[in-house]
Amino acid sequence: MHQLLRDRVNDFAFKLANVNGTGSASANGLIMQAIFRMGIPVSGKNLFPSNIQGLPTWYEIRVNREGHTARALEYDLMVAMNAQTYARDVKEVRSGGFLLYDSSWPLDSHLIRDDVNYVGVPLARMCGEHFQDSRERILMKNIAYAGSLVALLDIDMHLIEQLLEEKFSAKPSLRESNHKSVMIGYEYAKKHFDCPLPFHLAKMDGNQGKILIDGNTATALGAVYAGATVAAWYPITPATSVMDAFTRFCAKYRRDKETGANNYCIIQAEDELAAIGMVIGASWNGARAFTSTSGPGVSLMNELLGLAYYAEIPAVLVDVQRVGPSTGMPTRTQQGDLMECAYASHGDTKHILLIPADPAECFDFAVKSFDLAEKFQTPVIMLSDLDIGMNDWVVDKMAWDDSYVPDRGRVLTAEQLEQMPKYFRYSPEDENHVAARTLPGVHQKGAFFIRGSGHNKLGGYTEIPDEYQEVIGRLARKHKASAKFVPAPVIERREGAGFGVITTGGCDRAVREAMQLLANRGINANYMRIRGFPFDDPVVDFIEEHPFCFVVEQNRDAQLKSLLLLETPVAKNKLRSICVYGGFPLSANSVVDRILSQVEAK
Amino acid sequence: MPSIAKPVAKHPSLQRNKLDLTIRDYEGAMSTLCAGCGHDSITAAIVKALWKMSIEPHRIAKLSGIGCSSKTPTYFVNGAHGFNSAHGRMPSIAAGASAANRDLVYIGVSGDGDSLSIGLGQLCHAIRRNVKMVYVIENNGVYGLTKGQFSASTDIGSTSKKGDPNRMPPIDPVTMALSIGATFVARSFSGDKDQLVPVLEAAVAHRGFALIDVISPCVTFNDHKGSTKSYLASRQSMVRPIETDFVPPAEEILAQIGTNGVTSVTMHDGSVLRFTAVPKDYDPTDRGKVSAYLRERAAAGEVVTGLLYVDESQPDMHEMSQTVATPLVNVPYSKLCPGSGALSKLLDQFR
């Protein structure tokens, strides 16, 4: 046994190679959830294809007692359940690691590595003996390998039983067959192998006050708590589950108790052009409205985002980013929409961006998006991504402050209008360069004609240069004023830091782990995670205080770096790019390697 | 027609509606369209219909896309909120607005370019959704603001001002709407206010989406010999075999009921459409018969006008969505936020 693998309690990673559409997700989720309940920091990354059934899909689980849960690149154990990908899966096991395979059939000799330990469990054969139905045989094979993992990794069997009990409380027969399969795999592993493996799990107390949740669910919950009543959307991976969750939560919390009628209206639009149009129409009328989409949808929404920006209508858009350009890789993650969203639409346009790093921030920022959209009467785009949105993350349980009052911004009431001699839409402006708006149906004095065509500060049509510039200039000042209200950057300093590392969104955990790994080698750096656009002074100050900063992001063109150079006075040679953009969640190692290639270890 | 400036003063003899408002209270800014434009006549009909129905001006929301037609909402009901949106996107803006506040009266004005080319998709889906609104297509068969290109409603053989004939078949909004389940379909002529005003009233009273295709000649780019949508050609091809009166809810129906086909339809709000004349065997509630009749007359070179089809039995977008009766904008936040206790309880399941 390699020394490397000893004492690896609660610090290892394993990967499960499956065929999609065979029910492996529930087996993998079961394992992940049981580990979470054992109190061990854990992450699960679903690396899935853009397909319904039959293509390779992987699930990676990393446990780390220190709490580092970014994606690992080395696997101590491979659960190889897909014959199509055996060859490459075998290659990915770290030297001295283990490979669990279905030994109902012999393994080809070319798949045998002498530095890997093979654990053969005849899953198909055993399930064939115990189950009659062919579909059930396939599904239960996955649950059976989960059973073997329970034995091999020392997962608490009591927790597995509890989870099956909860999941199938309404379907006793399913609970029965799942339990049976778990036991088949468990008992075989116990009987034939030394259990547990040298790396394994042990209960700890690392998940106190934490939950396991995906970002899209948290985003939807944020929209419910913010008081969004109108949602319009067009199905798109990886954003669809935002609306699925919003629909579910609305059905649960927003049905009128007496009449059963809905205190919400969710519209599945004909396309993203219409989805954003509906959001703008609803917001114009005074509802909190939002849409969720991904890059291709944002491309289509560009047109009307410009209208909302220029006419000053609030709108909330959640962009769960995937890999572009074009259709790109719909089931893979990236931060490639930063530039597009910052300046979406033709002409001079700039938008407010909020960039959460995990599901807990998705919840908070979703609420914040509505407040800022109404306060500044403009579109707000929340940039999540597939990794945050669709994977389960361990985060602090979110709390709600019941004293929260939605910031509806400057909206005139009928009484206020009644007392005004005359109302004009775009003046006078307040200290944030925002003018009061009126809602249709409230009072005749508030009526005016809103338009995407040239208008002056009174709201009237204009083609006069000075009048046009007066309004468009104020919009730039308004955008700038919003910098003080977007979430401030998170800054973490280290003693003796020689440079800075800047990142954003879902890169957070990998970059922070990388900085710990670098610190272990004597390389110290300060950390800044940008959470909003436009940038406020602390962002500039951080860059200025360092001789140089790395900017770590998941896109080819260094979009965050470009945005920093465009929107702040910092010198170009201050920023160095680290771009990792192949489509999988970021891992600490890829950041460490790139920094080490440019910075001398002490 | 407000293409000439009128004095602000109101003549004391002007008739007043139930809100004690005169027709002048439903007018808008002065039109900037070409003198003689059909659209101005439609504006005048809208003014009259809304005045007759005594709708509070600020309870009206006017929406449009882009084009000559889409400029017109500025020319009626100054006291109403208006939204001049983007080209072809008005249906989605209106659907969203309606989702947020189901109590306003939505008047959408569009053109053949806005509705049948760039916005065809949105129009179709607003019809399918049965958004409760009046949707007027001011149809002149030509792009005006960009100076005379053919539109999707230009007939085969109709010529441009330069004399080039159009060779592509037109999209007829009426037959298209009927084919995808529209619940209120009418066609009229901008010059026929007698017909247009009651059709507009009926459209406002309709339970869902009311499509009115109004042939509206463009005096500048499409009123020449060779155009099938000139004033002259329109007057020659148009027939009005279907006559309808609109009787508001409170009024007693005094006139004799006719004998041909279906002669009256009770609207969702209690008002009644009284068909005083329909062709033999014509039933304005029978989608198949209406389509067949229109096809037959079109083959004979006739453009049939009138309130062609109505179906009050279909639920609108809100009914389908089972939304509360209170407009969503008026639902207090306390009813929308489940509170800290519910969040804590819910999140305990995420373990």
Image (cartoon, coloured by chain):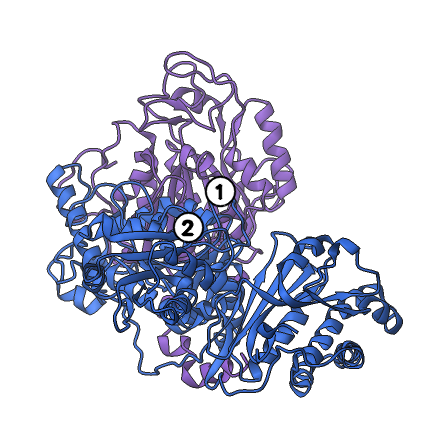
Which of the image's four quarters has the C terminus of chain A?
bottom left
From the rendered image, report the letter of the chain displayed in purple.
B
Q: Colour of chain A?
A: blue
- Return the x and y of residue B43 as percentages of the image width and height: 31, 40
Residue at horizontal 55 percent and vertical 46 percent from the top: B182
* Above or below: residue B174 compared with residue B237: below
- Viewer-proximal residue, B20 or A530? A530
Report whether mark 2 lies on the same chain as mark 1.
Answer: yes
* Above or below: residue B303 compared with residue B59: above
Residue at horizontal 44 percent and vertical 86 percent from the top: B341
Q: Is residue A474 left or right of residue A251?
A: left
**Which residue carries the number 1 mark?**
A326
Disc 2 or disc 1, which is closer to the eye? 2
Answer whether residue A227 is visible to the viewer in this image.
no
Q: Is residue A6 left or right of residue A318?
A: right
Q: Amino acid at mark 2?
A: Asn
**Which residue carries the number 2 mark?**
A555
- Return the x and y of residue A262 as percentages of the image width and height: 49, 70
The answer to which image quadrant residue B196 occupies is: top left
Q: Secondary structure at mark 1?
A: loop
- Return the x and y of residue B54 as percentages of the image width and height: 32, 55
Q: Secondary structure at mark 2?
A: loop
Q: Residue placed farthest to the top in the image?
A: B163
The answer to which image quadrant residue A463 occupies is: top left
Host chain of mark 2? A
Cβ atoms at labels 2 and 1 below 8 Å apart = no
Q: Amino acid at mark 1?
A: Ser
Which of the image's four quarters has the N terminus of chain A?
bottom right
Answer whether residue A597 is visible to the viewer in this image.
yes
